[in-house]
Image (tube, grey):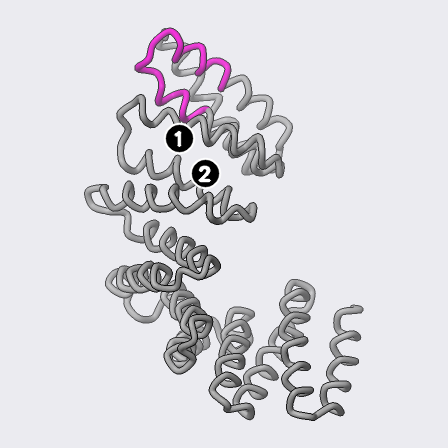
Amino acid sequence: MPARQQHITAIEEDHAAGLLKEGKLEEALRVATTGLAAARQAAEEDASRLPVLIKALESLGDVHREMNETDRAEKRYREAVDLLTKVELSPAKRGEVRARLATLLDFSQREAAAVPYYEQAIDDYEAMDPPDEDVTAQLRNNLAMIYKGLGKYALSEQHYLRGLEILEQRHGHESEFTATLFNNLGSLYYAAGFPEQGREMLEEALEIRTRLLGPDHPDVAQTHSNLASTCHDLGNNDSALEHYELGLSILESHIEDEAASYEAVGLDYIALLESLGDEKRASAFRKRMQRMLAK
């Protein structure tokens, strides 16, 4: 591939990425499609240009993904992943390609299909010198959530604990991501039938999130809600009601962005009140929730 053509292909990829950031999707699609055609031709003429083709496939896949064309994005990402067997790339690049496909599958409700790509991407990022530990911690969190959903609690715990260990070593105990992993680990223990351990993790998450984000942040509300479920499971319904009410109060102040969460937590709160025989409070809150959601 002539040096000038190589340079033009790189410019097209960067241009497409810039247009994507600006929200100019149709223009980004045109530029990325042109770039892929040039990169494919170059790779056919010279196999050493396969890395350029992989990059162009990623670029077009990113555009399709932003346009909610999931099937087309998956096709581009899968071709890029398949090409990894034919070329030597850095661990960081290999991890990037696999992580793109993993997250696409994960967030399009094909979690089980995402698992092997998450596992491989984690291996890639850990093979870097030095390893990219922040990225691996995030990928481990995503993978742990999938394993939890699949009922594979031991594997989920393994990834959460490893991610938590990495983050505490790098950022200390007081960080938002560390708090997120405490929260998720607490939810895992609750789902696995260990509510006491779950409560301990969730209380840690609540303490950190409240200090870092303030008492009125939606993430704090999420932890209150998780704690409410755990306290109920432990038979402490007074604490459960208190955490539900604190969480709902926070979500009401963010109702425009948190309506779905507010409704879900509210229904759990109503169910608990009804199970305790407090029909009056349950009915009153149901009316309040309907008014808030109507806004």
Amino acid under disc 2: Leu
Q: Residue at x 67, y 74 (%)?
A: 252
Mark drawn on residue 81: 1
Question: Which residue bears the numbered disc 2?
Answer: 101
Q: Residue at x 27, y 64 (%)?
A: 165
The mark total stands at 2
Amino acid under disc 1: Val
Q: Residue at x 37, y 24 (%)?
A: 83
The answer to if 48 sits in the magenta stretch is yes
Q: Which residues are magenta?
A: 36-56
The reply to whether discs 1 and 2 touch (Cβ–Cβ < 8 Å) is: yes
Secondary element at tag 2 = helix
Q: Is residue 26 visible?
A: yes
Q: Does residue 49 sit above or below 54 in this rendering?
A: above
Q: Quadrant of residue 169?
A: bottom left
- Foreground residue, 195 or 107? 195
> Residue 112 appears at what percent x and percent y?
46, 48
